[in-house]
Amino acid sequence: MPSRGNSILLLKMTTQEARLCGLLLREHFGDVVEKVGVHLLRSGTLNLRALAHETKTSLDLVKKCLCVLVQHGMAKFGPGRRGPAGPVEYQINCERILYMLRYPRYIYTAKSLYGDTGELVIEEILQRGQMTMSSVVRTVADRLTQNMEDGQSMDYSEVVNAFSKLVETHFIQRCPPVDSLGATASRTSSTGTADAPATTTPQSDQPESHPDCYRLPQIHLSGRGKRRRSSGDTEANGKGAKRAKMDNTEVCGDEGIHWQVNFERFHLHFRHQAIIGAVASKLDQTSSEIVRTMLRMSEVTTPATAAHTQAVSANEIFRALPPSYNISRPILDQYLTLLVDDPMEFVGKMGDSGGGMYVVNLHRALANLARATVESVVQERFGSRSARIFRLLLRKKHLEQKQVEDFAMIPAKEAKDMLYTLLSENLVQLQEIPKTPDHAPSRTFYLYTVNQLPTARLLLQNCYKTVGNLIERRLFETKENKRHLEKSQRIEAILASLQASGAETAQLAEVEEMITAPERQQLEALRHHINKLDSSENQVDETIFLLESYVNSASSR
Amino acid sequence: MAGKGRGIAAFTFNIEVLGLTRGSMPESQRGPQALFPQVEFKPVPLKAGEDEDYMLALKQEIRGRMKGLPFNIKPFSGRNDVERYKEKYVRECQKIEDEEWTPDWNRLPKELMPQKKKIRKKMGKYPKKPRKISNKEQEDVLSKLDELENKGDKSDEEKEKEEKKADEEEEVEGDEYDEELEEENDYIDTYFEDGDEYGAGSDDNMDEATY
């Protein structure tokens, strides 16, 4: 088991991840990018020519694909094994591709934090990979204006405001500067060695290491969002497009400064939400608000990978609590004691000064949340009695078969069956301890045990597989009903154009009836299925996030 | 249990020691598992709620939108021979504007830039060169041959030199364009085939890469 864990770390990618990456790439960027991307994933680092040759794709297409991947931060480039003079080599970032699964969640979070404007800012940047501030502001203002009532429009300055708030809270950041390739080559050639291809890329510089990372540029941009012309008259539309294009070329003073979404920051936010939510469901609302306050206080001072937050005293917590919570000082102390005593160990006590110094145990919280996830997976898949055995093994570490049967208070025959099922699913491991060197079974202890980290890894892989299957199923459903979908699309288009030209209601009804009742039923069923599949993807990703964070935190320890 | 045979009888020890009786062994598995095995426990229903619904809508919106963005690269299947009626309404209902995307080339390796200008130079030079040789240089050679008749071996050297020079030039150029020759960018070649050689540079600012 440990060797397998290592190989996962070394390759940073498994079969299931690669499959999911391919599916995601296809869904977002089309078949060609999928082909190029998957090949790059499989072979690690490659140069342009080799890539084109091995994928049997024309050089031009490969170039475009690489442009798209680099634009979205999914591929990196750098001087290759042959040094700065050799061909540029490309490398793909599997993790970043998998983040595409989480796009809805990033956008939703931005919406809940910064309203519609924040939502659209994040959405635009995610869809385009990286953008200059001025183009974000323009596009978002235009889109907001589009949704407003007639005569109203969105002022650019409001969007600028939302944008700068997102930058201040580090949800978006500048893309690290890329020098012209010659310059980067000389700078990174010292690190660029053949045996460590992961470090050969000039872009692997952490964006945070640049001082300007969160500095807003001065932009000269004033005005309001423009409404796109109604699609009815094409001439005006064409003119509008032309005007829009001219607007876009207007100089705003921030050319060359591109912004990207800071996924790490979003992940920190998700992690904190998960901890707060867990406290709320384990204890109560008030204690979750206390934990929320503690997390907010140490947000700036705690590094992202720290095992626990900076210690804060009970006095400080009391002062920082919003007055609306109405928590008096003695009650706060009681709550803190309660939180420290809780077996989930979300909060720890570090000292007694200042009324007691408290921390939030970030890594332990993640481990406990991951454990709860694994336990609930066992419970839902194998029943509550199997889950009892599983929890028993988690708590007691090593048990013999007889002990499992006794402690779990399950009849021997059934307990064996459950234990073997868990063993064959790799959720439980078996350890042999021979009393004599000949490993004779009669003189050997057979100890059953649960290793949380490998089990979490296993479940993570299962999750990737699940999402892959969900996407495949969705594609299959769509393909099966392609004819119906196309027909309904066509009729919708006809309806829209009729409506635009001011047709009578009778005429509209007639067109609508072109879809027969059974067809309508079938379409409804399809929509229901697809919604369910999509929702499942979103929700599996929540589990993926939790398990990933746990695995990462455990391996960084 | 080193695969000495099948079933319980194969064990070298008395399995009763482990607390197993004949009936308590799990059934051995025959063949691969079914693709969709019967699940003993029904899956829990999905979470429902406003936020889940909103994220679902976002997911579907993104999926639809990414198809229309210039980052979705379509293989050149070539112009469709027949314009299909379908395409018209598909374009209409998805409101695909033929949006153009010009990446910031400062942030990308030079080699990814489509090399239209260079290729155009190539197209301009290759057909010209033989013509040049055939007109002016041939005359030179002819006159030199005349001279040669008169002066004998002195001009021989000169001629050799000249030829060498020409060879060198060709070699240099050959090196430079070898790269392009390898490429299979057939679409650009055919695009500039029809007598575009002399217009080089006239519409330079139009050939920004647009995807």
Image (cartoon, coloured by chain):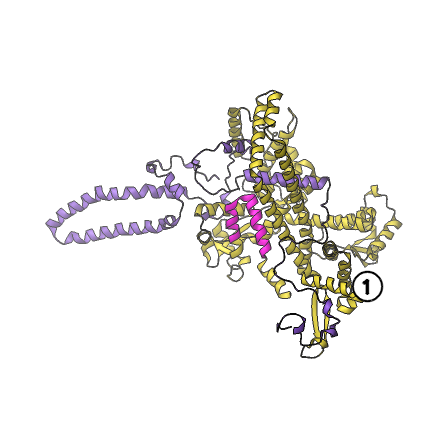
> Residue B121 at x, y = what percent?
35, 42
Q: Can you see residue A206?
A: no
Output the letter for the chain in purple: B
> Residue A355 at x, y = what percent?
85, 54
Q: Who is closer to the viewer here, A171 or A161?
A: A171
* Amino acid at pointer 1: Met
In-image side of A85 versus B137 (left or right): right
In-image side of A339 versus B121 (left or right): right
**Which span is picked out in magenta?**
A14-39
Question: The residue tagged with tag 1: helix, strand or loop?
Answer: loop
Circle 1 is placed at which residue position? A409
- Location of the N terminus of chain B (image quadrant): bottom right
Q: Is residue A15 magenta?
A: yes
Quarter assignment of residue A154: top right
Q: Is residue B199 magenta?
A: no
Output the letter for the chain in yellow: A
Quarter assignment of residue A458: bottom right
Q: Can you see residue A69?
A: yes
Instruction: Name the residue rendered at 44%, 34% in the picture.
Output: B82
> Residue B210 at x, y = what percent?
47, 39
A389 versus A154 height, above or below: below
Chain letter of mark 1 equals: A
> Residue A191 at x, y = what percent?
53, 59
**How dense is the environment of label 1, judged by Cα within 10 Å: few (below 14), some, or many (20 and up)?**
few
A547 versus A408 height, above or below: above
